């Protein structure tokens, strides 16, 4: 916090944070290996089950990805347990036909790294989104998506990881276009019947 306050000084906080996030996005665009990205997409599409691991602030990313993958796949498990015991209870059934997507950034979660290590030992394909191949998570993955993350004051900047997560969702959705169209067609009827969303009145 002290370092951040020194950096901010008399600057406009909004401009500084937005510029910092923009820099992370640009750097991430240069570091994400497109071959690794495509391999990750293929692995997810071919998986029997998908497990998504993310704890503490990274739980936000896990939940976001899980929300959208639940529209595309029938067997998606979001694991955001903060303790190793609870984590292992939820992933004990992981096997060779499954894919595990894990998120971890400094300060690295021991729970996530150990969970990824266990899943890989079962033969599951582990996809990691982290800032280095040498990070505790990066060393326990089959495919690593390198993204830039930084702390602004006490806040973890997750803009770049979220953007790459968006790219994963878009790429997978493009490959499942027919199935998704049918799913959302059914959902539209359900949402309409049960008034799930507020109706937008036509403006004069």
Image (cartoon, rainbow, N blue to C red):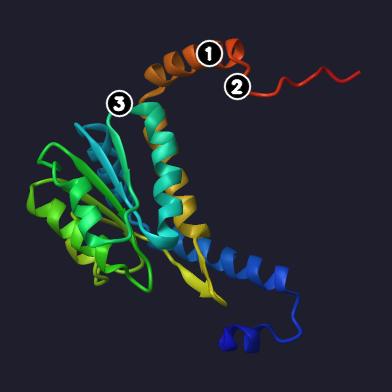
Residue at 49% x, 59% y is 160
Q: Is residue 66 above or below residue 126?
A: above
Q: Nearer the viewer, mark 3 or mark 2?
A: 2
Q: Is residue 29 left or right of residue 101?
A: right
Number of other residues with Cα within 10 Å of mark 2, as a class: few under 14, some 14 to 19, many 20 or more: few
The residue where tag 1 is placed is 190
Return the residue at label 2. Answer: 196
C-alpha distance separating marks 1 and 3 = 18 Å
Q: Quadrant of residue 137?
A: bottom left
Q: Residue furthest right?
A: 204
Q: Residues within 10 Å of mark 3 (few under 14, many from 20)?
A: few
Would you name the residue on which mark 3 appears?
Answer: 74
Q: Name the one closer to the observer, 131 or 119.
A: 119
Compare residues 122 and 18 and report the one nearer the observer: 122
Are circles 3 and 2 on residues that touch, CB within 8 Å? no
Q: Are marks 2 and 1 in contact (CB under 8 Å)?
A: yes
Residue 62 in the image: x percent, y percent? Answer: 39, 49
Q: Residue at x 32, y 54 (%)?
A: 81
User: Which quarter of the rendering shows the N terminus?
Assistant: bottom right
Q: Residue visible at 35% across and 55% down?
A: 54
Q: Earlier in the sequence, mark 1 or mark 3?
A: 3
Q: Are marks 1 and 3 in contact (CB under 8 Å)?
A: no
Provide residue 127's location: percent of width, then percent of height. Answer: 25, 51
Residue 49, how many percent across, how many down?
22, 34
**What kind of element bears circle 1?**
helix
Q: Is residue 68 left or right of residue 120?
A: right
Distance, label 2 to label 1, CA atoms, is 8 Å
Precedes in sequence: disc 2 or disc 1: 1
């Amino acid at each position: 916090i002290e370092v951040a306050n020194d950096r901010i000084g008399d600057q406009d906080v909004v401009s500084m944070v937005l510029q910092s996030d923009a820099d992370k996005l640009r750097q991430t665009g240069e570091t994400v290996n497109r071959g690794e990205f495509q391999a990750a997409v293929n692995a997810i599409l071919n998986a029997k089950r998908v497990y998504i691991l993310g704890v503490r602030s990274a739980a936000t990313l896990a939940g976001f990805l899980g929300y959208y993958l639940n529209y595309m796949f029938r067997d998606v498990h979001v694991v955001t347990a903060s303790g190793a015991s609870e984590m292992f209870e939820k992933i004990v059934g992981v096997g060779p036909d499954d894919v595990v997507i894990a998120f971890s950034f400094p300060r690295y979660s021991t729970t996530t790294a150990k969970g990824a290590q266990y899943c890989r030992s079962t033969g599951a394909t582990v996809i990691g989104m982290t800032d280095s191949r040498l990070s505790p998570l990066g060393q326990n993955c089959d495919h690593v998506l390198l993204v830039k993350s930084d702390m602004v004051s006490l806040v973890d900047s997750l803009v770049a990881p979220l953007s790459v997560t968006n790219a994963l969702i878009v790429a997978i959705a493009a490959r499942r276009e027919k199935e998704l169209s049918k799913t959302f067609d059914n959902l539209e009827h359900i949402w309409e019947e049960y008034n799930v969303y507020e109706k937008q009145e036509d403006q004069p």
